[in-house]
Image: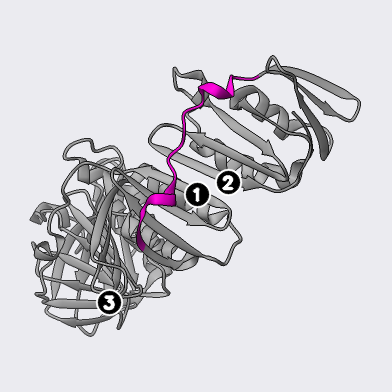
């Protein structure tokens, strides 16, 4: 095999494949990337046996066809650090490689391409749905924020549910303390079905999707134990999680006692300042809502300090003092796509719902922390004066 490579173009595809390769696998061949150069087409294939990617590559001129599995750790670094923007790759019949970059030469070994596992194909899979790239990025990002990749049991806690239901595409996740749900409309020709995918794979796919300039729709399909995403020149497959996601619609309560509408970026900034004080202690932020007045945030950590923030907001309903994990509040707000946010509360012990004002396409539900009277110690004395 002999190739002429434009580094700046080629590396965009290489780095996508590199994300999926199994860097620490004891099986050497899948710690590499299979490059296939046949006719006028060059493709890259990578897998960690749970996720796989196949992408066609631009920026490569094929002088002589062939296949090779390039070790990511060594050869990938040489590709990135090649001193010229155009370099040549030669692979002999024994799998020995040569990279020529200007006056510089680098020799390396490759893995036998015959040992590279056959990757799954979406060609025989059943359609799941089709959706615009940006809309898919939004709902998978918003819908996956409540899951926890560190949770191993039950398995659904570290997964994201993708569901087609009544012409809507839902993405949902939960860690048992919070739940996020994002929706988009799809063609009603797609039948109702769902699949559960590992969060780590979903987030890797979103990073890859963010690097694609194609304006094409993403075609999602399903086949046995696998889910497939196809967009532009990329095919991405994910092994599904064998678990049952809870009936999340039964979990959500419609009851509301107090509502708040507030600027999202201002709210995030205030919470992050409270987090500076409480992050190594209680991680608790207390929201004090006074209808017709301002929103007061309070954080207190013994032996560390106290924080009091006042934010403009539109508050309606009953007066309320309620506490939440400040990091979980920030997570929901940062995943949220929009300038302002509407929050509804169901008393001091009920669910908090975060929504886009006058919209129903995103919901973030968070359970409160138990608030004790001692958590408010010092609040009354922490007024406008310095001490």
**Residue displayed at 16% across by 40% down:** 154
- Horizontal side, residue 213 vs residue 239: left or right: right
Q: CA distance from mark 1 to mark 3?
A: 31 Å
* Residue 244, percent from left and from top: 15, 48
The residue carrying mark 3 is 360
- The answer to whether residue 253 shows anywhere in this view is yes
Q: Is residue 114 magenta?
A: yes
- The residue mark sitting in front, 2 or 3, is 2
User: Label 2's element?
Assistant: strand
Label of residue 339 in the image: none
Q: Earlier in the sequence, mark 2 or mark 1?
A: 2
The residue carrying mark 2 is 55
Q: Earlier in the sequence, mark 1 or mark 3?
A: 1
Q: Nearer the viewer, residue 296 or 331?
A: 331
Q: Nearer the viewer, residue 378 or 216?
A: 216
**Quadrant housing the C terminus:** bottom left
Magenta residue span: 110-128
Q: CA distance from mark 2 to mark 3?
A: 36 Å
For the residues bearing labels 2 and 1, Cβ distance under 8 angstroms: yes
- The answer to whether residue 384 shows anywhere in this view is no
User: Label 1's element?
Assistant: strand
In the rendered view, tell whether residue 136 sits above or below residue 149: below
* Residue 181, percent from left and from top: 26, 63
Q: Earlier in the sequence, mark 2 or mark 3?
A: 2
Q: CA distance from mark 2 to mark 1?
A: 6 Å
* Residue 117, percent from left and from top: 47, 28
Residue reaching furthest to the top: 94
**Residue displayed at 12% across by 59% down:** 247
């Amino acid at each position: 095999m002999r190739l002429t490579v434009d580094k700046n173009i080629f590396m965009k595809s290489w780095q996508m494949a590199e994300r999926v390769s199994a860097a620490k696998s004891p099986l050497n061949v899948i710690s590499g990337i299979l490059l296939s150069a046949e006719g006028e087409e060059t493709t890259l294939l990578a897998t960690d046996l749970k996720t796989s990617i196949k992408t066609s590559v631009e920026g490569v001129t094929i002088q002589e066809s062939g296949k090779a599995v390039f070790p990511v750790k060594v050869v990938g670094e040489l590709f990135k650090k090649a001193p010229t923007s155009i370099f040549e790759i030669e692979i002999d019949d024994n799998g020995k490689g040569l990279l020529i970059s200007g006056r510089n030469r680098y020799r390396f070994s490759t893995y036998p391409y015959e040992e590279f596992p056959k990757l799954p194909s979406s060609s025989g899979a059943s359609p799941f749905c089709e959706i615009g790239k940006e809309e898919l990025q939004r709902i998978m990002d918003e819908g996956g924020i409540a899951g926890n990749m560190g949770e191993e049991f039950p398995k659904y806690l570290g997964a994201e549910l993708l569901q087609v239901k009544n012409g809507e595409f839902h993405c949902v996740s939960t860690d048992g303390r919070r739940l996020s749900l994002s929706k988009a409309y799809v063609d009603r020709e797609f039948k109702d079905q769902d699949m559960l995918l590992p969060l780590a794979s979903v987030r890797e796919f979103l990073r890859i999707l963010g690097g694609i300039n194609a304006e094409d729709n993403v075609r999602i399909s399903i086949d046995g134990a696998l889910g497939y995403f196809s967009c532009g020149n990329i095919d991405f497959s994910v092994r599904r999680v064998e678990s049952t996601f809870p009936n999340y619609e039964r979990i959500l309560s419609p009851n509301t006692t107090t509502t708040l509408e507030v600027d999202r970026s201002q709210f995030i900034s205030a919470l992050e300042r409270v987090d500076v004080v409480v992050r190594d202690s209680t991680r608790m932020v207390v929201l004090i809502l006074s209808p017709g007045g301002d929103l007061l945030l309070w954080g207190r950590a013994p032996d560390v300090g106290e924080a009091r923030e006042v934010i403009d907001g539109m508050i309606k309903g009953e007066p309320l003092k309620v506490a939440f994990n400040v990091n979980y509040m920030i997570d929901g707000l940062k995943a949220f796509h929009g300038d302002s946010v509407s929050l509804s509360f169901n008393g001091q012990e009920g669910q908090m719902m975060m929504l886009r004002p006058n919209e129903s396409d995103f919901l973030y539900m968070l359970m409160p922390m138990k608030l004790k009277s001692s958590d408010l110690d010092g609040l009354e004395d922490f007024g406008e004066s310095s001490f």
